[in-house]
Structure formats: C-alpha cells, structure tokens
C-alpha cells in the first residue's frame, strides 16, 4: 500500500495528461461522436471561364470522405481596344454624327462604323474622315454609291468602295460637278477599278491621261507621281477636277464629256447616261 502511495507522483500526472488528450479528441470539431461534418471548399477557374468548386466533407459516423463538385460559367469580360484611351467603348470615333443610311449600308456588307474608323487610321488623308460632318443628304449619297459600286464590281473591296464613294461625293461638291455624273463616268471608264490602265496610258478610276495632265495634277498636289493615280481617292479627284474644268470651258455637260472622252462619241454619252440612270434606280431600291 505504501508502494502504491509512493508511485502516485509517477502515474497521476500521466493519467491527467491522458485524460486531457481523450477529452480534446472527443470534443474536436473534426472527430468523435460529437463532431460536426467538416467542410473544406476549393475553387478554381478554368481558361474557358468555368468556375469549378470542390467541397470536401466527412461523415460524422465513420469518418468517410465525401467529395462534392459543382461548376458554373463565368462570363468573360472582353477588354475593348479603346477602353484604355478613355474613349466611349460603345461608339467608334466617327459613330456620332453618322446618318442611319451609312450604318445600314455598312450592315448590308456585314460591317460596322468601327470599320470606317479603321480605314481612316490606315489612310489618314481619306475623305472618309469628313463623312460624319457631311449633311445627311450627302451621307445618304455616299451610302448609296458605296453599295452601288459593290453591286457593279464584286472585286472592289468594301474599303475601296467606301473610299471611292466618299471621294466622289466630296470632290463633286468641291469642284461643283453633279455627283451622279461623276459616278456615271467612273463606271463607264473603269467599273470603279482604281488599278485600271488603258493601252493609251489612261490611269485609275476615272482613266485620266497622266502624260497630258501630270503638270497640273502635280501642281495641285493631287498626284505628284504616276503611281498616285492608282490611289482610289486621288484618281477620283483628278477626274472630277478635269471634268469641272471642261464644263466651265465648254459650257455644257455634253461638250465637256466629248472633251473628257477625247472626241465625239454618241455611244460614250449613252453609256454615261445609262449608268446615271442605274445609280438612280439603285437608290430607289435601297431607300438611301
């Protein structure tokens, strides 16, 4: 009995420690009969934007691990290229001020006003930069002519068609020439092909004779080199300027056309008139 009493100092601390461990285990939130199922949740987002959520649970009876997985799709936010610049991301630089006819005409080509913005970036001197400043009536003309050009010559890209259409309206107004007359000549001369070249040396959309008019065109800054004539807008301006001078010099459109053609030709006048009528008919169909 005395031996047992003397050993109390050895076993009592150990017993107390053991009792503490057992109590901790029993009351632990993750183990024992009094435990509540533990949960651990992890989330991960895939490259496609799907959020995958995995929850690990343990049953309270046998401690078996249960895994639950759910997923949801997170809508990606696409950064607009203009957002960093502080511009309105819902409108292009030239959307404000554009007539609905322009927007509709672009839509028929599966394009948007932002395409005009891009084309101006590619050609800073393009008359397209004046498009949203034009009166609605002139914008409708541009829309009509652009779609007309594409209906006549599918090889002309939408960008070229819109640049030519804008130039035809802009320079016809600048040099006081009827727009439909300028369009009629452009179709007659080249089918709106800015790369056209005749065996006699006529160049560009309006088939201007560079070797005859290069001095005047160079002095005006329209075309300082021969290659400039193949630019769709420079070619248009050169032809419209010449036509304006001929109308002023000869007094009538018919005589001016004869001079432009280089001789009297009834068939040439007829073609121009027919093309003008086609443009009018196209406008009536499109509603522009």
Image (tube, helix red, strand yellow):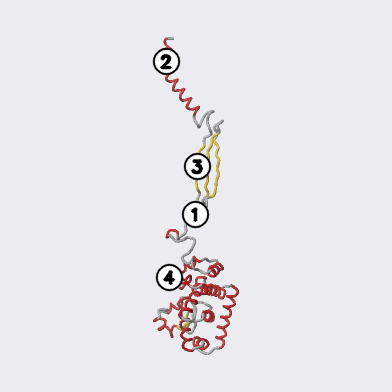
Asked if disc 2 and disc 3 are in contact, CB closer than 8 Å, the reply is: no
Q: Which mark is residue 124?
A: 4
How far apart are the alpha carbons under marks 3 and 4? 53 Å
Looking at the rendered image, the quarter that the C terminus falls into is bottom right
Packing grade of label 1 (10 A; few <14, some 14-19, many >=20) is few
Residue where numbered disc 1 is placed = 77
Q: Which mark is residue 270?
A: none
Residue 273: x %, y % from top left: 56, 83
Tell me which numbered mark, 4 or 1, is placed earlier along the sequence.
1
Residue 223 falls in which quadrant of the image? bottom left
Earlier in the chain: of badge 2 and badge 3, it is 2
Question: Does residue 112 lie above or below 21 as drawn?
Answer: below
Q: Are marks 1 and 3 in contact (CB under 8 Å)?
A: no
Q: Are marks 3 and 4 in contact (CB under 8 Å)?
A: no
Cα distance in 3D space between marks 2 and 1:
72 Å
Foreground of the two, 135 or 230: 135
Q: Which residue is mark 2?
A: 8
Q: Earlier in the sequence, mark 2 or mark 1?
A: 2
Whether tag 4 and tag 1 are in contact, CB under 8 A, the answer is: no
Which residue is labeled 3 in the image?
Answer: 42
Q: Quote the CA–CA distance across marks 4 and 1.
A: 31 Å
* Helix, strand or loop at mark 2: helix
Dot 4 lies on which element?
Answer: loop
Instruction: Indicate the quadrant containing the N terminus: top left, top right, bottom left or bottom right.
Output: top left
């Amino acid at each position: 009995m005395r031996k047992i009493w003397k050993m109390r100092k050895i076993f009592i601390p150990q017993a107390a420690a053991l009792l503490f461990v057992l109590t901790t285990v029993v009351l632990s939130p993750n183990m024992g009969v009094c435990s509540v199922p533990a949960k651990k949740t992890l989330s991960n987002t895939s490259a496609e934007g799907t959020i995958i959520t995995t929850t690990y649970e343990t049953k309270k009876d046998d401690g078996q691990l249960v895994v639950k997985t759910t997923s949801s799709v997170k809508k990606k936010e696409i950064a607009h290229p203009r957002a960093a610049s502080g511009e309105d991301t819902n409108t292009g630089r030239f959307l404000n001020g554009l007539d609905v006819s322009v927007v509709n005409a672009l839509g028929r080509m599966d394009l948007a006003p932002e395409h005009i913005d891009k084309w101006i970036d590619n050609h800073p001197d393009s008359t397209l930069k004046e498009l949203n400043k034009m009166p609605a009536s002139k914008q409708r003309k541009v829309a009509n002519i652009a779609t007309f050009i594409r209906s006549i010559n599918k090889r002309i890209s939408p960008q070229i068609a819109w640049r030519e259409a804008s130039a035809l309206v802009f320079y016809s107004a600048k040099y006081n020439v009827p727009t439909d007359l300028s369009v009629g000549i452009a179709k007659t001369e080249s089918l709106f092909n800015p790369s056209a070249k005749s065996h006699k040396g006529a160049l560009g959309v309006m088939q201007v004779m560079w070797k005859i008019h290069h001095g005047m065109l160079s002095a005006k800054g329209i075309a300082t080199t021969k290659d400039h004539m193949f630019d769709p807008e420079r070619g248009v301006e050169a032809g419209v300027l010449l036509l304006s001078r001929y109308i002023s010099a000869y007094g009538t459109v018919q005589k001016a056309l004869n001079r432009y053609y280089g001789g009297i030709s009834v068939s040439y006048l007829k073609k121009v008139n027919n093309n003008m009528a086609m443009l009018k008919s196209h406008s009536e169909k499109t509603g522009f």
